[in-house]
Amino acid sequence: MKDLGLATFIACVGLASGPQALALIQKFGIALPLVGVAIAVVPASISLFVGHRLLKLEAPVLLGAIAGQQCSTPALSAVQNAAGNATPLLGYTITYAISNVVLPLMGPLIVALAGLVAHAAK
């Protein structure tokens, strides 16, 4: 039932955002979705490398931490299903809490930096 509710929510958001997304893709080209994918994949990949190679974290805890870093409860559910237990929660809880504080604070900073870059380019 939870998965059905999540799928319905994602479908509704996608349908509501579709026309605006198409207009933006027409304006900025294929670079827009590629940058969006890179923004999600690059930090997770770096975290996976650092956690596995340098910190020597076990896979379930590390993947739970990456799910928390991305504030992705569906990813946590997938990792828990794959692990067969709740071990990924050990990594998820702290990174999720930190991400929920840092992400809203970084938004205005990124917008300000983008504005400065755009202003300097003129």
Image (spheres, rainbow, N blue to C red):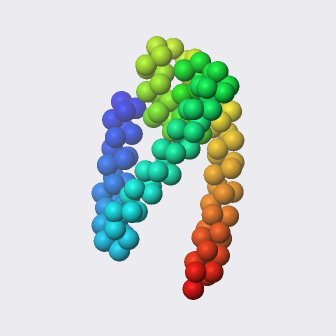
- Name the quadrant containing residue 56: top right
Vertical relation: 57 (above or below) 34: above
Q: Position of residue 38 (x, y in %)?
A: 46, 51
Vertical relation: 85 (above or below) 108: above
Residue lying farthest bottom? 122
Q: Position of residue 6 (x, y in %)?
A: 39, 39
Residue that appears at 50% across and 30% down: 76
33 left or right, relative to 71:
left
13 left or right, relative to 112:
left
Please state the total of marks drawn on the protein image. 0
Q: Position of residue 29 (x, y in %)?
A: 34, 68
Q: Position of residue 60 (x, y in %)?
A: 54, 20
109 left or right, relative to 60:
right
Answer yes or no: is residue 90 visible. no
Q: For the N terminus, which image quadrant?
A: top left
Residue that appears at 65% across and 76% down: 116
Vertical relation: 102 (above or below) 72: below
For the residue pair 95 and 114, the one nearer the viewer reads as 114
Answer yes or no: is residue 107 visible. yes
